[in-house]
Amino acid sequence: MQELNGFRYVNAGNQTGATPLLLMHGSGGNENDLILLSETIAQNRPYISMRGGVEWETGYAFFKRNADRSLDYVDLSYQTSRLCEFLASALETGVLKSKPILLGFSNGAITAASLLFHAPFLVAGAILVRPLSPAPDKDFPELASLRVFISAGEKDIRRSPGDVKLMSVQLERSGADVTTHVLPTGHGLHDDERKLIRNWIETKFPLAAR
């Protein structure tokens, strides 16, 4: 376990030329939650797996929710600024060899989307699994073909059918290259989801030939 700018993380791999992943878990989780997924979808790719900076339930989150479980947009903005500082330091010091692909689930996906909203210049792309828009009433900045994968569950009781559509439309309007899948599942991963993400990564971020 390592620490930088107040965030704890696991750092694995240093393959030259491979765009790294930045793993961001869901509410109540920790830095170990997405490692197996990462190794399944991108076996030969380096990653940094973050621990959210907010203690939440029996684990951690990347930002707080209100008592009614609505998004605390003030804290989301604050925590996003902290993550921007982490990313800038990680890139400057070589902890990250290049701008990462954000891989976020639920709370982590919302925060990853918030990074796209506030600081897209720090990332290479994003995989948003069960996201919500961090700024539903605002336009995203120009994203200039930044590659984004979005997946939602049509039986997800934590999301409404319009949530994934809003997220997709906002990013497409900003110029992002968006791939969206709505799968017959709930909040958890569908059986086909790992393959869909793996195929997207291999197509959009191919590994350098050896």
Image: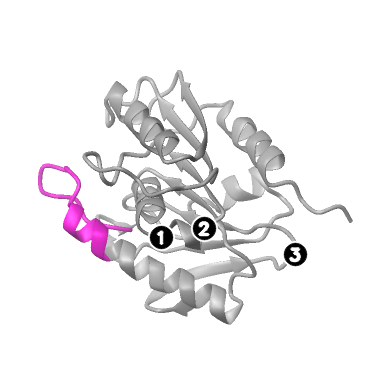
In the rendered image, the vertical position of residue 5 relative to residue 166, given as above or below: below
Q: Residues within 10 Å of mark 2 (few under 14, many from 20)?
A: many
- First to last magenta residue range: 62-78
Residue lying farthest left?
Answer: 67
Marks 2 and 1 close (CB-CB < 8 Å): yes
Q: Which residue is mark 1?
A: 119
Which amino acid, mark 3? Gln
Of the numbered discs 1 and 3, the one sitting upstream in the chain is: 3
Which amino acid, mark 2? Val
In the rendered image, the vertical position of residue 130 relative to residue 117, given as above or below: above
- 64 or 121: which is nearer to us? 121
The image quadrant that residue 154 belongs to is top left
In the rendered image, the vertical position of residue 122 relative to residue 194, given as above or below: below
Query: What quarter of the picture does the C terminus occupy?
Result: bottom right
Marks 2 and 3 close (CB-CB < 8 Å): no
Report, in whole angstroms, how far the alpha carbon at label 2 lies from the one at label 3.
Answer: 18 Å
Look at the image and say whether residue 66 sits in the magenta stretch. yes
The image quadrant that residue 21 belongs to is bottom right
Q: Position of residue 68 (x, y in %)?
A: 11, 42
Which amino acid, mark 1? Ala
Q: Position of residue 89 (x, y in %)?
A: 48, 77
Q: Could you say whether the residue bearing mark 1 is in a helix, strand or loop?
A: loop
